[in-house]
Amino acid sequence: MPSLRVALAQVNSTVGDIPGNAAAVRHWSRAAADAGAHLVAFPEMMLTGYPIEDLVFRNSFVAASRAALRTLAADLAADGLGDLAVVVGYVDADGPAPTSSDAVPGSGRRDASALLFGGGIAATYFKHHLPNYGVFDEDRYFEPGDSLTVVRLGGVDVALTVCEDLWQAGGPFAAARRAGVGLVVNINASPYELNKDDIRLSLVKRRAAEAGATIAYVNTVGGQDELVFDGDSMIVTAAGELLTRAGQFTAELLVHDLDLPAADATANPAGPVGAAGESPRVEQRRDEEMAIERFVVGAAPRPLTDGPAVGGIAERVTDEAEIWSALTLGLHDYVEKNGFRSVVLGLSGGIDSAVVAAIAVDALGPQRVVAVSMPSGYSSTHSRDDAADLAKRTGLDYRSEPIQPMVDAFLANMSLSGLAVENLQARVRGVILMALSNQEGHLVLTTGNKSELAVGYSTLYGDSVGGFNPLKDVPKTMVWRLAKWRNQDAARRGGEPPIPENSIVKPPSAELRPGQVDSDSLPDYEVLDAILAGYIDGDQGREDLIAAGHDVALVDRVLRMVDLAEYKRRQSAPGTKISIKAFGRDRRLPITNRFREGV
């Protein structure tokens, strides 16, 4: 059986930085060649970054992507890497954008993969399945491909596929079985959400069985606005054996030797039906829609002169460790890719701001984090002490700006009472943070969690101000879990826990009036988060939630709060997605909406 040394480049790209992304391809291709690889695969849209959204409608952007691909092929050869097969994602076009009056069905913008070899573009493939759910809008941007590209490399037939092709049965993987390929390369930009790695592995196994071939799955890593990508690249055999698997949230080169069947164009043994409930007839129809285009590149591969390359299998981590890595990487890349030098946040001594501060320190280092205590006349001594304690533990830049004189100046000129005075305090704090941002160039981090955003428990233009929210998709109950995990992890490593224990155990409070606690306005968070998970993440209705055992009056109260707060969420800062349904790109509801559950 022919042997191929395959390298999966689990790397970070930046949307729009085409020269920088191309340079990264050259760097990691050199590393792959030095490791003796015959083929190296990079993620989906590596050259352009992902997602590019409406940039795809600009002819200049598409032209830059196509030109960069040609230049990259020549540069790789000039680097002495002409005999290395490099699979890279980019944006192509064979027609006008769908927004053009000249658009023609069946042509347009393409989410593409290219195999570069010998200084040229040896073969290309256009993504067949286009996701149009959740955070994805690819049916708006791209035309689907209708043929499978098979490249004969080193005596092995290798099929090229892209991301969503893996998530649906039939199509490219059924065609790959018919084409008799030995290896399917699947390049991805698959965003993270909790426990998606478990789904991903079982999915790759199903597609490997469907194709009757080994699958090399490579995923990007890094943050892009609200999305974060976790990598988790892997290689799985047709029999479902996991050969090697990369870690999550780490940039790395996964190198592994594969013994693959020699190319003979004989169909592989039929695998099982792909997705549950799909009939063989449906799969066959999808398969017949795809032509097979074959290419041959290079002569026999370089013989392997060293011992077998074994990529290993990275250890899985706890949910809390996974989420913490997602949040720190998401914040780090948002700051770095947008050119901010530092961040600033309000540090109250409560659990939410404490966790955001710890995330920021882990993501950026303490020298790039400014935390401001802004006590009012209602701020407790223990809150001020807890904020100062966290600053001492983490080494961040800690400042204090008492707000009572500013609040008093407002009240001396305006007659306000009750909730208006409470919100005034929050808005004065927002003004202070934005002033520091303007004066010193910091990115303001807001600290509201998903539970508070869901029910509108925040002050518009007050504690909600900011350019990024690390906790936007993190329920309150998970915030506590993360705080406990981070402290335990520090202790396990022999370090100092960053979050004061008092911030974790004390009842949460906005401290905007005497004796205030969150439970004055909200149900217990354990109960609230369970209702919110059903209503928001699960799209359950009132009757579904009641049938699940939730109190009728409480369900009605929570659903009303969620529905009425849509206008606040529409104005909220972006934040890293970690759940199956995050506010923003995932959940799109009208602000003006009179439909109410149970009415």
Image (spheres, grey):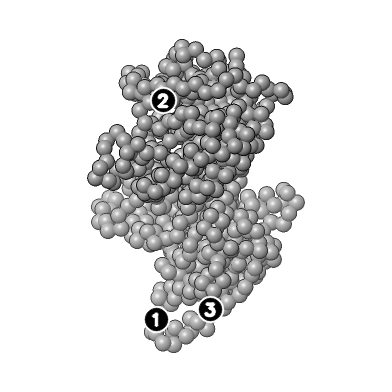
Residue bearing the label numbered 1 = 416
Is residue 442 left or right of 268 when viewed as pictured? right
Residue at 57% across, 20% down? 299
Q: Quadrant of the N terminus?
A: top right
Q: CA distance from mark 2 to mark 1?
A: 68 Å
Badge 3 element: loop
Q: Amino acid at mark 2?
A: Leu
**Quarter of the figure with residue 156:** top right
Badge 1 element: loop
- Going from N to C along the chain, the mark reached first, 2 or 1, is 2
Please determine whether, in this image, residue 73 is positioned above or below residue 427: above
Question: Label for residue 148?
Answer: 2
Marks 3 and 1 close (CB-CB < 8 Å): no
Q: Which of these two is toward me, 20 or 280? A: 20
Q: Amino acid at mark 1?
A: Leu
Is any atom of residue 352 visible in this view?
Answer: no
Q: Nearer the viewer, mark 2 or mark 1?
A: 2
Q: How many marks?
A: 3
Is residue 267 left or right of 358 when viewed as pictured? left
- Going from N to C along the chain, the mark reached first, 3 or 1, is 3
Q: Amino acid at mark 3?
A: Ile
